[in-house]
Image (cartoon, helix red, strand yellow):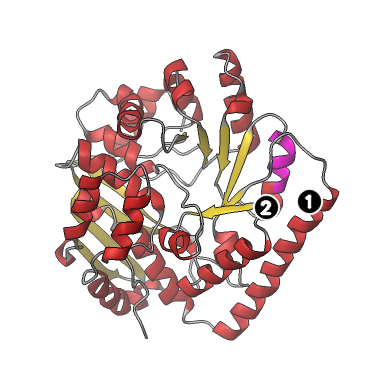
Amino acid sequence: MAPVITSLLDTDLYKFTMWQALLHRHPQTQAEYRFVCRNQPQFPLAGLVDAVNAELDALCRLRFAPDELDYLASLRFMKSDFIDFLRIFQFQRNFIEARAEGEQLSIVARGPQVHVMGFEIFVLAIVNELYFRQFDAHTALAEGRTRLAAKLARLQRAAAQGPRLRHPFEMFDFGLRRRYSGAWQREVVQTFAQEAPAWFKGTSNVLLARDLDLVPIGTMAHEYLQTYQALGVRLRDFQVAALEDWVQEYRGDLGIALTDTVGMDAFLADFDLYFAKLFDGLRHDSGDPVAWGEKALAHYARLRIDAATKRFVFSDGLDVERALSLYAHFGDRVQLGFGIGTQLTNDVGLKPLNIVMKLVRANGQPVAKLSDTPGKTLCDDATFLAYLRQVFNVND
Protein backbone atom coordinates (compact mmCIF):
# COMPACT_ATOMS: atom_id res chain seq x y z
CA MET A 1 0.00 0.00 0.00
CA ALA A 2 1.05 3.61 -0.49
CA PRO A 3 2.49 5.31 2.59
CA VAL A 4 -0.01 7.01 4.88
CA ILE A 5 1.74 10.36 4.41
CA THR A 6 2.68 11.32 0.87
CA SER A 7 2.90 15.13 1.25
CA LEU A 8 4.44 17.29 3.96
CA LEU A 9 1.46 19.63 3.58
CA ASP A 10 -0.75 16.89 5.05
CA THR A 11 -0.56 18.47 8.50
CA ASP A 12 -2.28 21.18 10.53
CA LEU A 13 -1.69 24.84 9.74
CA TYR A 14 -0.65 25.65 13.29
CA LYS A 15 2.38 23.42 12.94
CA PHE A 16 3.69 25.85 10.32
CA THR A 17 2.73 29.01 12.22
CA MET A 18 4.37 27.82 15.47
CA TRP A 19 7.34 26.46 13.51
CA GLN A 20 8.01 29.83 11.88
CA ALA A 21 7.71 31.75 15.16
CA LEU A 22 10.05 29.41 17.03
CA LEU A 23 12.55 29.26 14.16
CA HIS A 24 12.77 33.06 14.17
CA ARG A 25 12.84 33.54 17.94
CA HIS A 26 14.22 30.40 19.60
CA PRO A 27 15.90 28.19 16.97
CA GLN A 28 18.35 26.70 19.46
CA THR A 29 15.69 25.03 21.66
CA GLN A 30 16.06 21.29 22.24
CA ALA A 31 12.79 19.41 22.72
CA GLU A 32 11.28 16.02 23.49
CA TYR A 33 7.82 14.88 22.36
CA ARG A 34 6.11 11.69 23.54
CA PHE A 35 3.21 9.70 22.13
CA VAL A 36 0.43 8.74 24.57
CA CYS A 37 -2.77 6.75 24.09
CA ARG A 38 -5.30 7.95 26.68
CA ASN A 39 -7.94 5.26 26.18
CA GLN A 40 -8.00 1.48 25.78
CA PRO A 41 -7.68 0.33 22.15
CA GLN A 42 -9.40 -2.82 20.97
CA PHE A 43 -6.03 -4.47 20.39
CA PRO A 44 -2.53 -3.57 21.64
CA LEU A 45 -0.93 -0.74 19.68
CA ALA A 46 2.45 -2.43 20.17
CA GLY A 47 1.44 -4.72 17.32
CA LEU A 48 1.75 -1.76 14.94
CA VAL A 49 5.40 -1.01 15.72
CA ASP A 50 6.94 -2.52 12.58
CA ALA A 51 4.43 -0.78 10.33
CA VAL A 52 4.90 2.51 12.20
CA ASN A 53 8.66 2.31 11.73
CA ALA A 54 8.22 1.65 8.01
CA GLU A 55 5.93 4.69 7.77
CA LEU A 56 8.45 6.85 9.64
CA ASP A 57 11.13 5.71 7.19
CA ALA A 58 8.91 6.85 4.33
CA LEU A 59 8.09 10.16 6.05
CA CYS A 60 11.78 10.94 6.48
CA ARG A 61 12.33 10.54 2.75
CA LEU A 62 9.83 13.28 1.88
CA ARG A 63 10.74 16.84 0.93
CA PHE A 64 8.55 19.86 0.19
CA ALA A 65 7.73 20.03 -3.52
CA PRO A 66 8.05 23.36 -5.38
CA ASP A 67 4.27 23.72 -5.77
CA GLU A 68 3.79 23.06 -2.05
CA LEU A 69 6.30 25.79 -1.19
CA ASP A 70 4.55 28.12 -3.61
CA TYR A 71 1.26 27.53 -1.79
CA LEU A 72 2.78 28.22 1.63
CA ALA A 73 4.47 31.34 0.29
CA SER A 74 1.07 32.58 -0.90
CA LEU A 75 -0.14 32.78 2.71
CA ARG A 76 0.63 36.36 3.68
CA PHE A 77 1.85 35.50 7.18
CA MET A 78 4.49 33.04 5.93
CA LYS A 79 7.86 34.78 5.55
CA SER A 80 10.31 34.19 2.74
CA ASP A 81 13.18 33.01 4.95
CA PHE A 82 10.94 30.37 6.51
CA ILE A 83 9.98 29.13 3.04
CA ASP A 84 13.70 28.94 2.22
CA PHE A 85 14.22 26.87 5.38
CA LEU A 86 11.44 24.50 4.31
CA ARG A 87 13.04 24.25 0.86
CA ILE A 88 15.99 22.40 2.37
CA PHE A 89 14.14 20.75 5.27
CA GLN A 90 13.94 16.97 5.69
CA PHE A 91 12.92 14.98 8.76
CA GLN A 92 15.87 13.14 10.31
CA ARG A 93 15.15 9.51 11.16
CA ASN A 94 17.56 9.43 14.08
CA PHE A 95 15.46 12.08 15.86
CA ILE A 96 12.48 9.74 16.29
CA GLU A 97 12.16 6.23 17.75
CA ALA A 98 9.18 3.88 17.82
CA ARG A 99 9.26 0.65 19.84
CA ALA A 100 7.02 -1.71 21.74
CA GLU A 101 6.88 -1.57 25.55
CA GLY A 102 4.78 -4.55 26.53
CA GLU A 103 1.41 -3.93 24.89
CA GLN A 104 2.06 -0.18 24.62
CA LEU A 105 3.44 1.68 21.63
CA SER A 106 6.23 4.09 22.58
CA ILE A 107 7.16 6.87 20.17
CA VAL A 108 9.63 9.57 21.20
CA ALA A 109 10.94 12.45 19.08
CA ARG A 110 13.98 14.16 20.55
CA GLY A 111 16.29 16.82 19.08
CA PRO A 112 16.29 20.45 17.96
CA GLN A 113 12.70 21.63 18.29
CA VAL A 114 12.59 23.10 14.80
CA HIS A 115 13.53 19.64 13.47
CA VAL A 116 11.23 17.48 15.63
CA MET A 117 8.10 19.54 16.31
CA GLY A 118 6.67 18.67 12.90
CA PHE A 119 6.54 14.94 13.66
CA GLU A 120 3.46 15.21 15.91
CA ILE A 121 0.55 15.34 13.46
CA PHE A 122 2.14 12.88 11.05
CA VAL A 123 2.69 10.33 13.84
CA LEU A 124 -0.93 10.61 14.98
CA ALA A 125 -2.26 10.25 11.43
CA ILE A 126 0.01 7.24 10.83
CA VAL A 127 -0.99 5.41 14.03
CA ASN A 128 -4.68 6.06 13.43
CA GLU A 129 -4.69 4.86 9.85
CA LEU A 130 -2.65 1.74 10.58
CA TYR A 131 -4.91 0.90 13.52
CA PHE A 132 -8.18 1.31 11.62
CA ARG A 133 -6.92 -0.74 8.70
CA GLN A 134 -7.41 -3.73 11.01
CA PHE A 135 -11.21 -3.32 10.80
CA ASP A 136 -13.63 -3.89 7.94
CA ALA A 137 -13.39 -0.80 5.74
CA HIS A 138 -16.58 -1.42 3.76
CA THR A 139 -18.75 -1.49 6.89
CA ALA A 140 -16.98 1.52 8.46
CA LEU A 141 -17.24 3.72 5.38
CA ALA A 142 -20.90 2.85 4.81
CA GLU A 143 -21.69 3.82 8.38
CA GLY A 144 -19.54 6.94 8.08
CA ARG A 145 -21.43 8.12 4.99
CA THR A 146 -24.76 7.55 6.73
CA ARG A 147 -23.64 9.64 9.70
CA LEU A 148 -22.16 12.30 7.43
CA ALA A 149 -25.51 12.69 5.66
CA ALA A 150 -27.23 12.99 9.05
CA LYS A 151 -24.89 15.82 10.09
CA LEU A 152 -25.65 17.74 6.92
CA ALA A 153 -29.39 17.19 7.40
CA ARG A 154 -29.11 18.46 10.98
CA LEU A 155 -27.48 21.68 9.80
CA GLN A 156 -30.21 22.13 7.21
CA ARG A 157 -32.91 21.72 9.88
CA ALA A 158 -31.14 24.16 12.18
CA ALA A 159 -30.97 26.74 9.41
CA ALA A 160 -34.66 26.31 8.62
CA GLN A 161 -35.96 26.27 12.20
CA GLY A 162 -33.53 28.18 14.34
CA PRO A 163 -33.74 31.88 15.25
CA ARG A 164 -31.58 34.33 13.35
CA LEU A 165 -28.80 35.39 15.69
CA ARG A 166 -26.52 38.39 15.35
CA HIS A 167 -23.51 36.38 14.24
CA PRO A 168 -23.44 33.49 11.71
CA PHE A 169 -22.79 29.84 12.52
CA GLU A 170 -19.36 28.83 11.16
CA MET A 171 -17.61 25.50 11.52
CA PHE A 172 -14.23 24.09 10.48
CA ASP A 173 -12.60 20.69 10.12
CA PHE A 174 -10.06 20.10 12.91
CA GLY A 175 -9.96 16.32 12.47
CA LEU A 176 -6.60 15.45 10.93
CA ARG A 177 -4.97 14.09 14.10
CA ARG A 178 -7.84 11.71 14.86
CA ARG A 179 -8.98 10.80 11.35
CA TYR A 180 -10.06 7.34 10.25
CA SER A 181 -7.89 7.74 7.16
CA GLY A 182 -6.53 10.42 4.87
CA ALA A 183 -8.93 9.44 2.10
CA TRP A 184 -11.92 9.61 4.45
CA GLN A 185 -10.94 13.05 5.76
CA ARG A 186 -10.74 14.28 2.17
CA GLU A 187 -14.20 12.88 1.40
CA VAL A 188 -15.72 14.44 4.52
CA VAL A 189 -14.18 17.85 3.95
CA GLN A 190 -15.07 17.87 0.27
CA THR A 191 -18.64 16.88 1.05
CA PHE A 192 -19.08 19.65 3.62
CA ALA A 193 -17.47 22.19 1.31
CA GLN A 194 -19.88 21.27 -1.50
CA GLU A 195 -23.06 20.68 0.51
CA ALA A 196 -22.77 23.24 3.32
CA PRO A 197 -20.70 26.20 2.09
CA ALA A 198 -22.79 28.66 4.11
CA TRP A 199 -21.54 27.10 7.36
CA PHE A 200 -18.37 25.19 6.51
CA LYS A 201 -15.54 27.72 6.34
CA GLY A 202 -12.27 25.81 6.20
CA THR A 203 -9.96 23.09 7.44
CA SER A 204 -6.82 22.88 9.54
CA ASN A 205 -5.36 20.44 6.97
CA VAL A 206 -3.08 22.50 4.75
CA LEU A 207 -3.04 19.94 1.93
CA LEU A 208 -6.84 19.79 1.75
CA ALA A 209 -7.11 23.57 2.00
CA ARG A 210 -4.87 23.88 -1.02
CA ASP A 211 -6.44 21.08 -3.05
CA LEU A 212 -10.06 22.06 -2.33
CA ASP A 213 -9.56 25.84 -2.39
CA LEU A 214 -10.54 26.28 1.26
CA VAL A 215 -9.26 28.61 3.97
CA PRO A 216 -6.52 26.96 6.09
CA ILE A 217 -7.45 27.44 9.76
CA GLY A 218 -5.19 27.55 12.82
CA THR A 219 -2.94 29.67 15.01
CA MET A 220 -1.17 28.11 18.02
CA ALA A 221 -1.23 24.95 20.13
CA HIS A 222 -0.18 24.20 23.69
CA GLU A 223 3.38 23.26 22.68
CA TYR A 224 4.08 26.86 21.65
CA LEU A 225 3.16 28.30 25.05
CA GLN A 226 4.69 25.36 26.96
CA THR A 227 8.04 25.94 25.26
CA TYR A 228 8.26 29.30 26.99
CA GLN A 229 8.24 27.56 30.38
CA ALA A 230 11.82 26.50 29.60
CA LEU A 231 13.28 29.52 27.83
CA GLY A 232 14.73 31.32 30.83
CA VAL A 233 11.93 33.81 31.46
CA ARG A 234 10.43 33.88 34.95
CA LEU A 235 7.93 31.01 35.02
CA ARG A 236 5.10 33.31 36.10
CA ASP A 237 5.72 35.36 32.94
CA PHE A 238 5.90 32.58 30.35
CA GLN A 239 2.43 33.24 28.89
CA VAL A 240 3.11 36.95 28.54
CA ALA A 241 6.43 36.25 26.79
CA ALA A 242 4.82 33.76 24.40
CA LEU A 243 1.93 36.06 23.52
CA GLU A 244 4.26 39.03 23.05
CA ASP A 245 6.50 37.08 20.67
CA TRP A 246 3.41 35.98 18.72
CA VAL A 247 2.25 39.58 18.36
CA GLN A 248 5.68 40.65 17.15
CA GLU A 249 5.93 37.74 14.72
CA TYR A 250 2.51 38.08 13.10
CA ARG A 251 1.59 41.73 13.70
CA GLY A 252 -2.17 41.29 13.51
CA ASP A 253 -2.48 38.03 11.61
CA LEU A 254 -3.36 34.73 13.32
CA GLY A 255 -5.04 36.48 16.21
CA ILE A 256 -6.77 33.67 18.11
CA ALA A 257 -5.06 32.92 21.45
CA LEU A 258 -5.20 29.52 23.16
CA THR A 259 -6.32 29.90 26.76
CA ASP A 260 -5.84 26.69 28.74
CA THR A 261 -2.12 25.95 29.01
CA VAL A 262 -2.36 26.73 32.73
CA GLY A 263 -6.13 27.18 32.89
CA MET A 264 -8.53 29.95 31.92
CA ASP A 265 -8.25 31.94 35.15
CA ALA A 266 -4.45 32.12 34.96
CA PHE A 267 -4.68 33.02 31.28
CA LEU A 268 -7.07 35.90 31.85
CA ALA A 269 -4.79 37.26 34.59
CA ASP A 270 -2.15 37.72 31.86
CA PHE A 271 -4.52 38.72 29.05
CA ASP A 272 -4.56 42.42 29.81
CA LEU A 273 -5.94 45.33 27.79
CA TYR A 274 -2.92 45.31 25.49
CA PHE A 275 -3.36 41.68 24.46
CA ALA A 276 -7.16 41.86 24.51
CA LYS A 277 -7.05 44.64 21.94
CA LEU A 278 -4.36 43.04 19.76
CA PHE A 279 -5.77 39.51 19.59
CA ASP A 280 -8.92 38.87 17.56
CA GLY A 281 -10.26 36.32 20.03
CA LEU A 282 -9.78 33.17 22.08
CA ARG A 283 -9.84 29.39 21.60
CA HIS A 284 -11.49 27.00 24.05
CA ASP A 285 -9.94 23.53 24.35
CA SER A 286 -10.82 22.22 27.82
CA GLY A 287 -13.27 22.68 30.67
CA ASP A 288 -16.93 23.66 30.56
CA PRO A 289 -17.33 25.69 27.34
CA VAL A 290 -20.26 27.74 28.61
CA ALA A 291 -18.48 28.71 31.82
CA TRP A 292 -15.35 29.48 29.79
CA GLY A 293 -17.28 31.70 27.39
CA GLU A 294 -19.01 33.59 30.17
CA LYS A 295 -15.65 34.24 31.85
CA ALA A 296 -14.24 35.54 28.59
CA LEU A 297 -17.22 37.82 28.00
CA ALA A 298 -16.97 39.18 31.53
CA HIS A 299 -13.25 39.83 31.02
CA TYR A 300 -13.88 41.82 27.84
CA ALA A 301 -16.63 43.76 29.63
CA ARG A 302 -14.25 44.66 32.47
CA LEU A 303 -11.77 45.95 29.89
CA ARG A 304 -14.60 47.88 28.14
CA ILE A 305 -14.07 45.99 24.88
CA ASP A 306 -17.11 45.22 22.73
CA ALA A 307 -17.22 41.42 22.59
CA ALA A 308 -19.11 41.59 19.28
CA THR A 309 -15.80 42.60 17.68
CA LYS A 310 -14.09 39.44 18.97
CA ARG A 311 -14.30 35.73 18.12
CA PHE A 312 -14.52 32.61 20.28
CA VAL A 313 -13.35 29.37 18.68
CA PHE A 314 -14.56 26.18 20.38
CA SER A 315 -12.52 23.04 19.67
CA ASP A 316 -12.87 20.59 22.57
CA GLY A 317 -14.59 17.31 21.70
CA LEU A 318 -17.34 18.94 19.66
CA ASP A 319 -19.98 17.35 17.51
CA VAL A 320 -22.51 19.22 15.36
CA GLU A 321 -25.21 19.10 18.05
CA ARG A 322 -22.93 20.53 20.74
CA ALA A 323 -21.72 23.24 18.37
CA LEU A 324 -25.29 24.28 17.60
CA SER A 325 -26.08 24.40 21.32
CA LEU A 326 -23.10 26.68 22.00
CA TYR A 327 -24.07 28.82 19.04
CA ALA A 328 -27.57 29.27 20.46
CA HIS A 329 -26.05 30.36 23.77
CA PHE A 330 -23.42 32.81 22.48
CA GLY A 331 -24.45 33.71 18.92
CA ASP A 332 -26.00 37.09 19.80
CA ARG A 333 -23.01 38.28 21.82
CA VAL A 334 -19.76 37.31 20.07
CA GLN A 335 -18.48 36.03 16.74
CA LEU A 336 -18.09 32.25 16.81
CA GLY A 337 -16.24 29.41 15.14
CA PHE A 338 -16.48 25.67 15.84
CA GLY A 339 -13.55 23.37 15.11
CA ILE A 340 -14.89 19.82 14.98
CA GLY A 341 -12.39 16.98 14.93
CA THR A 342 -13.02 13.33 15.72
CA GLN A 343 -16.78 13.60 15.23
CA LEU A 344 -16.21 14.73 11.65
CA THR A 345 -13.31 12.57 10.47
CA ASN A 346 -13.63 9.43 12.59
CA ASP A 347 -17.36 8.98 13.16
CA VAL A 348 -17.65 5.63 11.38
CA GLY A 349 -19.09 3.36 14.06
CA LEU A 350 -15.72 2.34 15.53
CA LYS A 351 -14.32 3.51 18.85
CA PRO A 352 -11.77 6.28 18.08
CA LEU A 353 -8.33 6.27 19.61
CA ASN A 354 -7.63 9.11 22.05
CA ILE A 355 -4.01 9.64 21.11
CA VAL A 356 -1.71 12.64 21.51
CA MET A 357 1.97 13.40 21.00
CA LYS A 358 2.90 16.15 23.40
CA LEU A 359 5.92 18.26 24.25
CA VAL A 360 7.23 17.01 27.61
CA ARG A 361 10.68 18.65 27.82
CA ALA A 362 12.43 21.69 26.39
CA ASN A 363 16.10 22.47 26.93
CA GLY A 364 16.27 19.53 29.33
CA GLN A 365 13.54 20.94 31.58
CA PRO A 366 10.04 19.53 32.08
CA VAL A 367 7.10 21.48 30.71
CA ALA A 368 3.42 20.96 31.42
CA LYS A 369 -0.15 21.79 30.48
CA LEU A 370 -2.57 22.38 33.35
CA SER A 371 -5.77 21.61 31.51
CA ASP A 372 -9.20 22.74 32.69
CA THR A 373 -10.40 19.18 32.00
CA PRO A 374 -9.34 16.40 34.40
CA GLY A 375 -7.28 13.79 32.56
CA LYS A 376 -5.89 16.15 29.91
CA THR A 377 -3.07 17.46 32.09
CA LEU A 378 0.20 16.06 30.77
CA CYS A 379 3.60 16.14 32.47
CA ASP A 380 6.14 13.43 33.35
CA ASP A 381 7.64 15.35 36.30
CA ALA A 382 5.41 15.56 39.39
CA THR A 383 7.69 18.06 41.12
CA PHE A 384 7.53 20.55 38.25
CA LEU A 385 3.78 20.04 37.94
CA ALA A 386 3.31 20.87 41.62
CA TYR A 387 5.54 23.94 41.27
CA LEU A 388 3.61 25.16 38.22
CA ARG A 389 0.33 24.76 40.12
CA GLN A 390 1.75 26.76 43.02
CA VAL A 391 3.07 29.57 40.81
CA PHE A 392 -0.28 30.00 39.06
CA ASN A 393 -2.44 29.13 42.09
CA VAL A 394 -4.14 26.23 40.28
CA ASN A 395 -5.73 23.57 42.44
CA ASP A 396 -5.04 19.90 41.77
Q: Earlier in the sequence, mark 1 or mark 2?
A: 1
Magenta segment: 324-330
Q: Splitting the image into 4 quarters, where does residue 238 fall?
A: top left
Q: On the image, numbered disc 1 is attached to which residue?
A: 159
Confirm whether residue 130 shows in the render: yes
Q: Nearer the viewer, mark 1 or mark 2?
A: 2
Decide: is 44 above or below 262.
below
Which amino acid is tagged 1?
Ala
Decide: is 356 above or below 102.
above
Q: Position of residue 338 (x, y in %)?
A: 60, 47
> What is the number of the mark on residue 360?
none
Q: 374 or 34, which lies in front?
A: 34
In what element is the residue under mark 1?
A: helix
Q: Say whether residue 270 is left or right of residue 301.
A: left
Tell me the residue at 73%/34% (across/down): 166
Q: Residues within 10 Å of mark 1 (few under 14, many from 20)?
A: some
Tell me the residue at 37%/75% (across/down): 4
Q: Splitting the image into 4 quarters, where does residue 129 fall?
A: bottom left
Confirm whether residue 379 shows in the render: no
In what element is the residue under mark 2?
A: loop
Q: Position of residue 227 (x, y in %)?
A: 28, 38
Q: On the image, numbered disc 2 is attached to which residue?
A: 198
Tell me the residue at 48%/21% (across/down): 277
214 drawn magenta: no
Quarter of the image where the N terminus is located: bottom left
Q: Are marks 1 and 2 in contact (CB under 8 Å)?
A: yes
